[in-house]
Amino acid sequence: MIMELDLVKGDNTLYPAYDSDKDKLNKIISGEIYRYKVWKPRNLKFHKKFFALINFGFQNSKLDFPDQNIYRYYIIMKAGHYIKVETLKGAMHLPKSISFDKMDDSEFEDVYNAVLQQILIDTGVTEDDVKNELINFF
């Protein structure tokens, strides 16, 4: 049986974080041995802030991008978060994934800061302008 559930640590006890996790925890049989892999999930609010930053960059870009997803790929690669793939016709650059299971909060913060710097260059706005625009995210 493989399942994922979110737990919160109390005084040396783990508690289900949500009702759905409580239901999952009830399926675990007492006295049986289970192996747990523990990790802290990424901050969803920070992830949403990143996409708000991308939207801000797209809306204020001096470049002409008809599609926000293309702008996102472009600005992530400009920030140095890409892989280089060698092909028969030469090197090709592809943006690395920013998905939750690909990096932790620390790595994601590095990408966020690098993207922020590229957006400042791309748009010509100040960091304070961006902070004021995104103030509701933290």
Image (cartoon, rainbow, N blue to C red):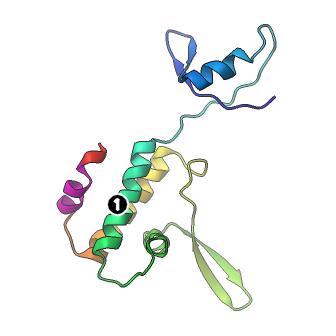
Q: Is residue 113 left or right of residue 129?
A: right
Does 88 appear in magenta? no
Relative vertical location of residue 21 with respect to residue 103 in this rendering, above or below: above
x 44%, y 58%: residue: 111
Instruction: Find residue 131 and report its image quarter.
Output: bottom left
Q: Which element is circle 1 on? A: helix
Q: Is residue 29 left or right of residue 85?
A: right
CA neighbours of label 1 inside 10 A, class few (<14), some (14 to 19), many (20+) = many
x, y percent for residue 25 = 67, 18
State the count of labels: 1
Magenta span covers which residues? Answer: 127-135
Frontmost residue, 126 versus 72:
72
Look at label 1 and name its amino acid: Leu
x 44%, y 74%: residue: 71
Q: Is residue 56 left or right of residue 3?
A: left
Relative vertical location of residue 25 with respect to residue 127 in this rendering, above or below: above
x 29%, y 42%: residue: 138
Of helix, strand and loop, which mostly describes the magenta segment? helix
Question: Which quadrant of the rendered structure holds the N terminus?
Answer: top right
Q: Residue furthest bottom?
A: 89
Does 129 appear in magenta? yes
x 22%, y 75%: residue: 124
x, y percent for residue 119 = 32, 70
Q: Which residue is mark 1?
A: 53
x, y percent for residue 53 = 34, 60
x, y percent for residue 125 = 20, 70
